[in-house]
Image (cartoon, grey):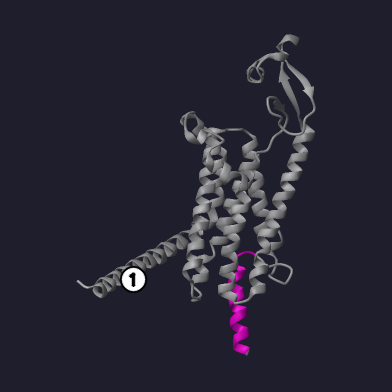
Amino acid sequence: MDFCGLKEILYKIHNSVNKLLHWALVHFTDLTAGLLAHFLFRRHFHFLLSVLVMFGPVLSLWVSKYSIFGNKNHYLYRLFLHSCWGWTCVLCGSFIFLLSYCISNSFIHSVRHLSRLAVAGTLWTLFRHLLSFLVDASGSCFEALQSPTEIHRNPRELLESTGPFLLLREEKGNAAGLQWQGCEVSDDILILSLCCLILAEEIGVFRPCMALGKPVGTPLRILFLLCVLLMSLWIFLIVCLLAHFPLFPSQLVGGALGYLGWKGLYYKGRYVLKPAWCCVGRPKALLSDNTCNTASNGTT
């Protein structure tokens, strides 16, 4: 077999593999988009997430304390948990921009739809600062001491002792080696719940937008799958935190605040208003962008 024949065979194999991968990508994204756009998922996802946050700590009865996810220094926590909102903004923002541009062919409309993430980010920042202020104002750091000679004991032993509490000093937040007595709200569960609900809301319109007949390229489909994967990762991290680090009721309060933030933004806040220059509306407003774009093309 000469070199040209071998090159032609490799070229055909390459084309066949590309067609197979593209076929798998198209069918898998269509199936996933159909599930996320189904009315049962859109109507009950927030309820299922609430049930998970409420009863998730029960899983701590069965998980092993030697599990790799029981270590807060695990790379999943370090890489994703502490930058949860950043990952959500990058992937979800890219998906929103490409999808809106694909439908409206307008850069301005695409940027305006990104304002939903900007408002959600502002809400998260306000939540974080308000909760930090409330926690600092409602509690103090204590150290367990039984006698003056125990001051030189190991801090871990002091933390695990059951003697009377002695107010040592006022600290902002939970200081290392001390016990915090006061109200606490789980920031991790709050932001993870909020990100899950926002992702489900934003990517749930992918199927109706594809039904408009607009060409959907491979990059947009890949971004959609990355957003689905990211939402699945946030749900997995919620399960890990509830199972390995149960903190009742701070995690329940955090999940409730995340739900209220999502409900206030997408169903009770400015997004329920009619889309205008100062309000882009909910994600389904993308469908009206296509109508306006079609009408403008018809008049020209």
Residue 147 seen = no
* Residue 297 part of the magenta-drawn span: yes
Q: Residue at x 77, y 30 (%)?
A: 171
> Looking at this view, is 28 or 254 the one in front?
28
In the displayed structure, 245 sits above or below 5; it is: above
Residue 86 seen = yes
> Looking at this view, is 172 or 126 the one in front?
172
Could you say which quadrant of the image residue 181 lies in?
top right
Residue 72, position as x, y percentages in the image: 56, 35
In the displayed structure, 160 sits above or below 237; it is: above
Q: Residue at x 72, y 47 (%)?
A: 127
Q: Residue at x 65, y 36 (%)?
A: 250
In the displayed structure, 271 sits above or below 160; it is: below
Residue 115, position as x, y percentages in the image: 68, 63
Residue type highlighted by circle 1:
Asn
* Residue 230 part of the magenta-drawn span: no
Could you say which quadrant of the image residue 98 lies in?
bottom right
Residue 134, position as x, y percentages in the image: 77, 38
Q: Quadrant of the C terminus?
A: bottom right
Left or right: residue 237 versus residue 184 is left
Q: Quadrant of the N terminus?
A: bottom left
Left or right: residue 186 versus residue 44 is right
Which residue is labeled 1 in the image? 15
Circle 1 — which element?
helix
Range covered by the magenta-colored residues: 282-299
User: Which secondary structure class fits the magenta region best?
Assistant: helix
Left or right: residue 264 versus residue 69 is right
In the displayed structure, 298 sits above or below 160; it is: below
Farthest-out residue, left: 1
